[in-house]
Amino acid sequence: MPDHVPFEAVRALALWAVLAAGAALLVWRPLVRRTGWAAPPTLALLAWTGLVLAMTLPMTVAPGSGGRLGRCVAHPVADIAWSVRIFGTRGLEDVMNVALWVPCGFLAVLATRRPIAAPAVTAAVFVAVEFLQTLDPGRECDPGDWAYNSAGVAAGALVGAVLIRRRRFRPVAADRSVR
């Protein structure tokens, strides 16, 4: 990994982020109206997901993606098991592969009120992003990242589900002002 980030990469990331924010704003209201999802967490989910996609989608497309994809899916169970065993040894990368996706799981549950389906779909989207990374020869599709990303989504979804459950089943306090 380089010690510095080239200006072109920062510029491309900024462009992706602006496009993602614009797309989030365009689809937010119609999505809320059509699905009945909660408006604020839906906007936050779209914005955060756009930011994550801006950071993780390939910046370039080059020949040879078939070979890169083949290496990615050759031994997924063994690769995931190895990645789980060495978690944390690659420094901040491992932690970020979990932490970056926690808000997606949390916000997906708050927006949709579906604590199982929402994180499952969200995790599947990020597995697809890992596959798309094979298009860029500078990126790496890593089955271990599938596990890390999915763990982040699941952790966020768990917190969201607990929060929804507490709000839904909180007993209403008796009004003592009227006697």
Image: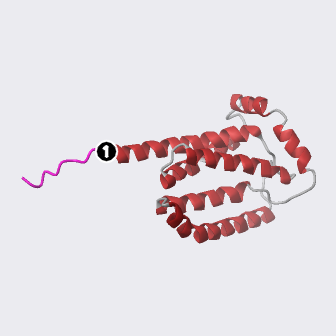
Q: Residue furthest front?
A: 34
Q: Is residue 169 visible?
A: yes
Q: Is residue 69 magenta?
A: no
Left or right: 176 with respect to 81? left
Q: Is residue 2 visible?
A: no
Q: Determine the residue positioned at 64% across, 59% down.
A: 51
Q: Is residue 84 above or below residue 23?
A: above
The way the protein has been coloured in the rendering is secondary structure
Rendering coords of residue 20 (x, y %): 66, 65
Rendering coords of residue 143 (x, y %): 76, 39
Left or right: 141 with respect to 120? right
**Tag 1 residue:** 170
The local secondary structure at tag 1 comes to loop
Q: Residues within 10 Å of mark 1 (few under 14, many from 20)?
A: few
> Picture quarter containing residue 152?
top right
Which sits in the foreground, 119 or 81?
119
Q: Determine the residue positioned at 67% across, 69% down.
A: 18
Rendering coords of residue 107 (x, y %): 52, 53
Rendering coords of residue 74 (x, y %): 85, 35
Q: Which residues are magenta?
A: 171-179
The three-letter code of the residue at mark 1 reads Arg
Q: Determine the residue positioned at 42% across, 45% down.
A: 163
Left or right: 112 with respect to 150? left
